[in-house]
Amino acid sequence: MNEILTKKDVNRAGLRWMVMPMSSFCYEVQFGQAVVFALAPALRKIYPNDDDYLAAINNHFKYFNTQPYMCQIVLGAALGMEEQLGRAGAETIQDFKTGVMGPLAGIGDTLFWVVIPTIWASIASPMALEGNPTGIILWTIFAIVLTLFRLKFFEWGYRLGTRLVTELKSTLQVLTDSCSILGLTVVGALIPSVVSVTVPLVITFDTGTTMAVQDQLNAIMPYMVPVALTAICYKLLGGKKVSMTVLVFIVLIISIVGAALGILG
């Protein structure tokens, strides 16, 4: 092992990456600028010669885009390859980054944008809605732990290099599938406690008797209206018929009009 970098150098690269992805994002190279910013000090240590250093910088200043947290694994591995292969491995390193950014984006988006935050929020949000400070404490703990794990991602990538993808591929797929199932279960259980929609209409018959519409709906299926509303929203989003922003405004307008007419509560 031709080790030039220290653990401090690797962690520094990881920290530099964490503060830059969305700050320097552009449509030409996506995260390319952030990659160069993160790796530059470490690359300078690997390549003390100016020409080699500039060549390495230019090799990384290319189109690169995947889920930001998974980027740390890819960039850590790329840095390890730079250290071991040198300038002779420039094409190999670039091919590696290009080859893994797509599959890792799918895994990262599922785990870190959808499943894990949804599961944790389903625990913390009800507490916060009830005025329990434990809710915000749990979310703060989540943010801190995730930040520490992101630093470890970079170090793991650096230590494992290209072996990371081949050795953990099946494990990551099983983890993704399991978390997806758990996430869907949590979302379903979250509907009754978070989505609050009722139909307060009361029908009066000629005989003088009355019938509360909400009671009849509850007799058929408790929380029928919240479930139906959630299903419609998911259908619209899944079919890409409307954007999230438009959907929010639609729900807001229907809620206001329905409450004003006494149809929804």
Image (cartoon, helix red, strand yellow):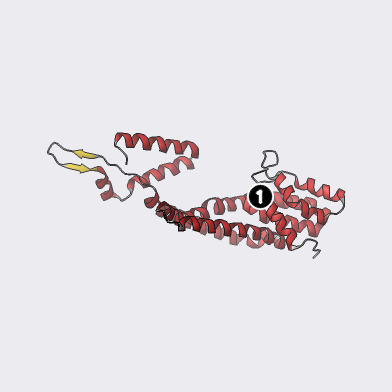
- Can residue 261 be seen? yes
Give the amino acid at mark 1. Val
- Can residue 103 be seen? no
Q: Secondary structure at mark 1?
A: loop
Q: Position of residue 151 (x, y in %)?
A: 65, 58
Q: Position of residue 41 (x, y in %)?
A: 77, 53
Q: Residue 206: which quarter of the image?
A: top left
Relative placement, left or right, of 57 versus 65 is right
Q: Which residue is mark 1?
A: 19
Q: Residue 152: which quarter of the image?
A: bottom right
Q: Nearer the viewer, residue 130 or 21?
A: 130
Q: At 47% from the left edge and 36% from the top edge, which residue is drawn?
A: 246
Q: Position of residue 214 (x, y in %)?
A: 27, 45
Q: At 29% from the left edge and 37% from the top edge, which residue is drawn?
A: 262
Residue 130 drawn above or below residue 249: below
Give the quarter of the figure containing the C terminus.
Answer: top left
Residue farthest along the left direction in this orientation? 207
Q: At 37% from the left edge and 36% from the top edge, which residue is drawn?
A: 256
Q: Position of residue 108 (x, y in %)?
A: 59, 52
Relative placement, left or right, of 93 versus 141 is right
Give the quarter of the figure containing the N terminus.
Answer: bottom right
Relative placement, left or right, of 60 versus 124 is right
Q: Residue 164: which quarter of the image?
A: bottom right
